[in-house]
Amino acid sequence: MKKITLLVALLISFLTFAQKDELKTLKKIYAKDTPSTSDIEDYKSALKTLETLAISEEDKVYTNFYTGMLPMAELNNLGSKITPKEVQRLMSPKNIEIFVNSMNETLEYEKKEGKKIYTDDINEAYSFLIPQIEQAAFQLNEAKQYKMASATFYNLYKLDKKSGSNLLNAAILSVQGEDFPTAIKLYEEYRDSDYLKNGMVYFAINKLNDEEESFTSIRARKTKLDLKTHEKPRDEKVSGRSDILKLIANLKVQTGDVEGAKKAYQDLVSESPNDLNILIEQANFYYVQNDVTTYKNLIKEIIKKDPTNASLHFNIGYLGLSEDAGLVEEINKNLDKPKKYEELMAKRKSMYEAAMPHFEESYKLDPSSENTKIMLKSTYEILGLKDKAAKL
């Protein structure tokens, strides 16, 4: 038993030394300003070995760090020989995502451990890479590669959570790329972000055309101010929460998430309880879902807030007649059954009597509406009010 334990201990010791050697190799190559092609091959080989050897949290974190930094090492290796095609390959959305995740992981780990082995390097890399990634994101957008552009803007947001406009751009581009599930997820993240609650939009005037431009971060604006191309900076609090909630509701409708859409409309109405357009949009959603009862109840509540809206009164009256076609069919089927016939006629009369005040109110508020006039006249005629019908 002791021999087995000893062998296991020797094996673990061997593996530990091996992975330390691999990490040393990576650290040595990483430190070079211009690594050779051979160095890059050794770098990749060391990473591959560490895929199975890295066991401790520290070793895993720094293995991921070097993985994320691989494109940077390759860029340094190519130097002036780099081509646009190589830049596109090395700065792909996937590589950027790996870079962002591994750098953030390293920053969090070093903060937790109270040490700064690569924190300063990462922040320096950010200052260099963020403008490059921004440029790549806008180029992907211009090329109508919306999904890739969305992913790139999202990675920018993960690099700097204060640049919430990048998260919004990612959501917008997901819609343009017709990736609606991702768009919902991104808009919901934007809805809950600190940026939407407390963020600022940074403005400055472009001296060339005297037009005010917005910037995704104070850093981006400062660059322009330092270059003297812009002046008169001003800040403005981020707004538009209701618009975001409306977009989420509409996207959930579009993806067939009825229950999710109901919740989204509830959130939207809670945010803007007196916005009649939003209240009407919510009511129309229920109408499309064939939930006529909820629709009518919502419209009645809206009328209390806006009793002068002729269209709302008309809608209530019109919906009250939704069973008319079926009743007429039943009446015609029972012409030879007096008792049943009278019951159906009485039901139809009662239905029109309930609708009449709504048509009258709608006509009173908007006498120019031909639809209201036609419906009111028909109602009067069906109820035998010929004198009133003749005046229309």
Image (spheres, helix red, strand yellow):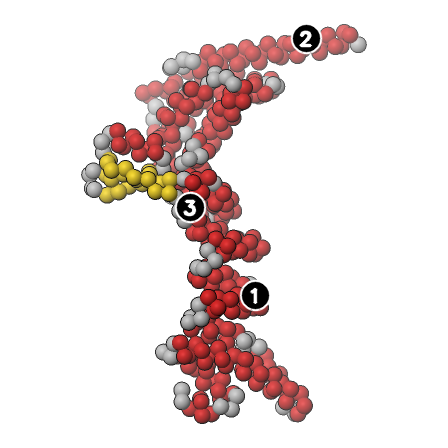
Q: Secondary structure at mark 2?
A: helix
Q: In 3D space, how far apart are the residues under numbered discs 1 and 3 (Cα atoms)?
A: 32 Å
Please name which of the two marks, 2 or 1, marks the residue nearer to the observer: 1
Count up the numbered dots: 3
Cβ–Cβ under 8 Å for marks 3 and 2 = no
* Residue sitting at x 40%, y 89%: 391
* Residue sitting at x 58%, y 68%: 293
What quarter of the picture does the N terminus occupy? top right
Q: Residues within 10 Å of mark 3 (few under 14, many from 20)?
A: some
Residue bearing mark 3? 172
Q: Secondary structure at mark 3?
A: helix
Closer to the N terminus: mark 3 or mark 2? 2
Give the number of the disc on residue 294.
1
Q: Give the amino acid type for the residue marked by disc 1 in the picture.
A: Thr
Residue bearing mark 2? 10
Residue most toward the right? 1
